Each structure stands twice: as structure tokens, then as C-alpha cells.
Image (spheres, rainbow, N blue to C red):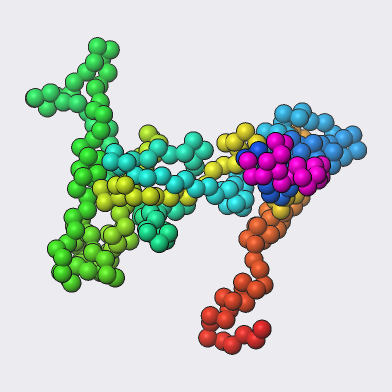
């Protein structure tokens, strides 16, 4: 169980006795470590007179990590963020624990985040080197020689955005120039990335690189993304989701064992779904005052 096993002085100043020096674990009490999850599960669920008579500790650890991975995508708040300045090379290497992006934006002079949308009009195909007769070239081992970068990506980096002439109101949208590569349909049916001037990005999933349009060079961009919760040295889970993890482990263990009665598997499946629903509600962090503020924006009068 998570106990307060340190004094207030150590919590605020850390082991080195210096305030906010980087060795403190501020807010760590809201989480439960993977080791504690495994220990607590063995105490509550494993034993001769319990639902699971015998199991290896490594099996519990495996299912606990799988639970954290699954919950990190839609239940646990595992969103992270990176901020960098876009170099003239117009690309960014994806973070080591990156799974999927949540939001891309660049920061203006007032600190506001301007959303950057992904483009659907380009890609980074494998460029095959060809000779003067347009035939493929091969190396000494007989493998096809590939170019360092495709011509498609080169043209995207240098020519994707073509600003409309100044003062042309027909191409002006919300006081920002309308950048539309093809201009088909004019404004009707525009895709989001073509109806704004914040730039676009393209993710090369195979190479793990994010490419940006040329108008984002030297801008400060922020990548908000989700991980799977197990890509760090210290794996932990929020206490609001702790019970859901236990139910997930129990269901996974019983569901993979031979001769387990089906009613037991279904029982823990229902309990897992219910515990996961409760975890989502708790982690949504809804406050009565905030809900009342939202409702006051509606047409119906809400008394305080």
C-alpha cells in the first residue's frame, strides 16, 4: 500500500536538502508503483483458499504491464509533451516512448498555441535510385539502391505553401491567407489543413520522423502525445485506476488457464469493465463548480 514513509522536510527538499533541486518526487503519492501492484495482487488474490491458488510472480507482472498499456490509451492520463524549435531541416524525431500524437501546435508571441493539422496530400515513399536510362541501380550485394530522401518530400518541404497575393480578399479567411494547394471547390469542402495558415505536418511512421511545412521553420512547436505507460524506468499507475488493474490481472490470469469455469471468467470480466468505468469517471476530474460554469453559458438560467 502507498504509505507516507518520509517526513515533510524530505518531501519538499529532497535527499540533498535543497528546495526544488530535481531529486524530489512531488505528487508521487497519487501513484502506485508496479512492484506494489504485484505485491498487493498476490496478497489479495493468490493463496490456497483464494480465487487463484498458485501463480508465478512474473506472470502477474506481465499482465500488470499489459493492463497499464491498455489503460494508457483511453483511461489513464498518460499525455506527454515536447517543445522544440523547428530547424531548417524541417523535421523532428519522434520521442522514444511515442505511440500516437494528440495535438500539434506552434506558439505565437503571446504564448497561444496555434493548431497544426496533418496533411493528407503528401507522403515519403521509398525513392529508388535510377541510372540515365531510368533503370534501377543495385549495390554489390544485388540490393536496390535507395536515395536518402524522396523527391515528394523535398518538394513538400520547400514548396507546399504558396501565399496568395496580398490584398486578394477572395483568398482571405479569418484575417489569414487561404493556402490551398489545388483550390478545387474554392472554400466549399475545404479540408482543415488547407483552410488555415498555421502550417501542416506529416509523420513518417516507418522512420519515426515528423516533417513540417516550410513556413514553420524557426517556430516553437509543441507535440502532445500519448505513451503506453511502460516506456519509463519507473512504471506506475494512478490510484484511481488501481482497482481496475487488479480486476484486469485476475481476468487475464483466469482467462488463460485451462479448466477455469467459464462463470468465473465472465464474473471477473464484468468486474473489470465496471472498475474501468469507475476509473474513467474518477480520472475525468469533473468538478461541480466547473459544470455549473458550463451550464451558465447555456440559454437556460441556472441558479447558484
Q: Is residue 17 magenta?
A: yes
Location of residue 91 in the rendering, given as x and y in whole percent from the top left corner:
33, 40
In the rendered image of this protein, does residue 25 appear above or below residue 177? above
What residue sits 56% from the left and 87% below the top? 300
On the picture, is 227 further left or further right than 283?
A: left
Q: Is residue 265 visible?
A: no
Q: Is residue 4 left or right of residue 145?
A: right
Q: From this view, report whether residue 171 is shown above or below residue 134.
A: below
For the C terminus, give its image quadrant: bottom right
Q: For the view shown, which residue lies furthest in the left direction?
A: 133
**Residue 53, x across and y down, in percent:** 85, 34
Q: Residue at x 59, y 76 (%)?
A: 293
Q: Position of residue 33 (x, y in %)?
A: 71, 40
115 is higher (above) or lower (below) than 122? below
Residue 223 included in the magenta stretch of the image = no
Q: Position of residue 298 (x, y in %)?
A: 53, 82
Per the rendered image, the range of residues in magenta is: 2-21
Q: Against 122, is 137 above or below? A: above
Q: Quadrant of residue 169?
A: bottom left
Of the pair 248 and 31, the residue shown nearer to us:
31
Amino acid at each position: 500500500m502507498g504509505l507516507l514513509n518520509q517526513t515533510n522536510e524530505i518531501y519538499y527538499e529532497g535527499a540533498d536538502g535543497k528546495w526544488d533541486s530535481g531529486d524530489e518526487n512531488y505528487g508521487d503519492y497519487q501513484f502506485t508503483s508496479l512492484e506494489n501492484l504485484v505485491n498487493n495482487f498476490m496478497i489479495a488474490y493468490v493463496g490456497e483458499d483464494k480465487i487463484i491458488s498458485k501463480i508465478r510472480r512474473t506472470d502477474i507482472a506481465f499482465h500488470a504491464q499489459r493492463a497499464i498499456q491498455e489503460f494508457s490509451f483511453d483511461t489513464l492520463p498518460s499525455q506527454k509533451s515536447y517543445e522544440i524549435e523547428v530547424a531548417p531541416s524541417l523535421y523532428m524525431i519522434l520521442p522514444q516512448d511515442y505511440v500516437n500524437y494528440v495535438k500539434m501546435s506552434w506558439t505565437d508571441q503571446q504564448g497561444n498555441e496555434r493548431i497544426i493539422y496533418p496533411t493528407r496530400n503528401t507522403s515519403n515513399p521509398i525513392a529508388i535510385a535510377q541510372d540515365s536510362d531510368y533503370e534501377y541501380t543495385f549495390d554489390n550485394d544485388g540490393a536496390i539502391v535507395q536515395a536518402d530522401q524522396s523527391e515528394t518530400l523535398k518538394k513538400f518541404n520547400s514548396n507546399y505553401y504558396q501565399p496568395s497575393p496580398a490584398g486578394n480578399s477572395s483568398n482571405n479567411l479569418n484575417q489569414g491567407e487561404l493556402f490551398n494547394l489545388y483550390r478545387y471547390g474554392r472554400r466549399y469542402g475545404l479540408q482543415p489543413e488547407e483552410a488555415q495558415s498555421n502550417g501542416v505536418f506529416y509523420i513518417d511512421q516507418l522512420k519515426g520522423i515528423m516533417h513540417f511545412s516550410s513556413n514553420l521553420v524557426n517556430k516553437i512547436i509543441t507535440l502532445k502525445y500519448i505513451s503506453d505507460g511502460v516506456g519509463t524506468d519507473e512504471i506506475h499507475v494512478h490510484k484511481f485506476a488501481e482497482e481496475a488493474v487488479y480486476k484486469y490481472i485476475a481476468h487475464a490470469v483466469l482467462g488463460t488457464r485451462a479448466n477455469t469455469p467459464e462463470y468465473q471468467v465472465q464474473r471477473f470480466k464484468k468486474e473489470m469493465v465496471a472498475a474501468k468505468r469507475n476509473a474513467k469517471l474518477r480520472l475525468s476530474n469533473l468538478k461541480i463548480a466547473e459544470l455549473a460554469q458550463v451550464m451558465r453559458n447555456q440559454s437556460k438560467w441556472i441558479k447558484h
